[in-house]
Image (cartoon, rainbow, N blue to C red):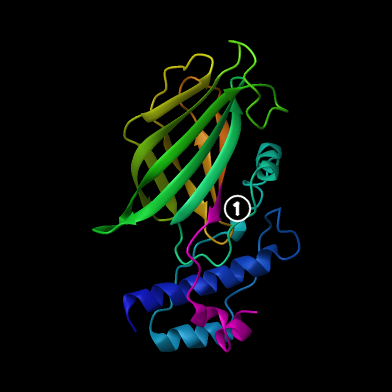
Amino acid sequence: MGMWGCQDATDVLMRWQARKSREAELKRMYGHPGGTSPVLLFILSGLGCFRDEMPVQDQKAMEWDSEELRKQRERLPEVAQDCYDDIVGIWVGQSLLSRSWHHFTLDIERDDRDKDRINGTIYTEVWNGAEEDIEPPECIDDGHIHYTLEQPAIGSYEDGVLTVSGKSIENKVKHCGNMHNYFADTFTGEVAVGMNEFRVINDDGYNPRSELLFRRIECDEKPAIFRTWPLSWVLD
């Protein structure tokens, strides 16, 4: 069986374990102490592509379940399902930093030349407001700030840690107010594969140190063969 098939089969196992762990409460992350399904272990071992080291997601429950992260989750769209790759797809995150809202959209792809490297774009939208202003307010006077920009990005994904770094600031659009000087972003943190979440500690030296949660909302789905009998029966 080729590399593509092995990666897909083991990813299916990870998704199965993660899905079982979140069935009770999808919006909150709790650990799953259970082990690998004997049936799946037999199938994957027979294919010769079972990975002994699976991503440890069940130990992140408390660390990833702070009050701030719960608030951020409530603001985000529904999580993507049946993703083929650990990281490829569209990720979104939004947080309030120094009285300015920052909404980030990460469009991530694998580098064709190196599977551990990534390429993509960071789309950023900034507006000022209070905690309840989770959407950009109408531009009424010069006191309102609202602008968007893009950052071509590169990065890496190794040992469960994703790094996405903007290379430059492009396509700046001012909707109202004055645009602040904006420096390229770098996001680094652990990925909870089964939960499709990416947790970052924002420590840019200017804003107070804070948590930022990205959720994957779009991705390429698993091939249909893994969503039909008999594998769908085994996974359910």
Q: Quadrant of residue 211?
A: top right
In this view, the residue farthest toward the left is: 113
Q: Quadrant of residue 176?
A: top right
Q: Is residue 98 left or right of residue 166?
A: right
Q: Decide which of 47, 137 is in the foreground and name it.
A: 137
Q: Is residue 129 left or right of residue 9?
A: right
State how many labels appear.
Answer: 1
Point out residue 218 in the picture as x, y percentages from the top left corner.
53, 56
Question: With respect to residue 57, does 129 lie above or below?
Answer: above
Residue located 67% across and 41% down the image: 75
Q: Which residue is mark 1?
A: 60
Point out residue 94 in the picture as x, y percentages from the top left corner.
59, 36
Point out residue 146 in the picture as x, y percentages from the top left corner.
55, 23
As helix, strand or loop, the secondary structure at mark 1 comes to helix
Q: Does residue 174 show up magenta in the picture?
A: no
Which amino acid is tagged 1? Answer: Lys
Image quadrant where one finds the N terminus: bottom left
Point out residue 44 in the picture as x, y percentages from the top left corner.
46, 83
What segment is highlighted magenta in the picture? Answer: 215-236
Question: With respect to residue 47, does 195 lie above or below?
Answer: above
Image quadrant where one finds the C terminus: bottom right
Q: Is residue 197 left or right of residue 162?
A: right
How many C-alpha atoms fall within 10 Å of the one at disc 1: few (<14), some, or many (≥20)?
A: some
Residue located 62% across and 11% down the image: 141
Q: Does residue 235 show up magenta in the picture?
A: yes
Say if residue 146 shows up in the picture: yes
Q: Quadrant of residue 35?
A: bottom right
Residue located 39% across and 42% down the image: 121
Question: With respect to residue 222, does 110 lie above or below?
Answer: above
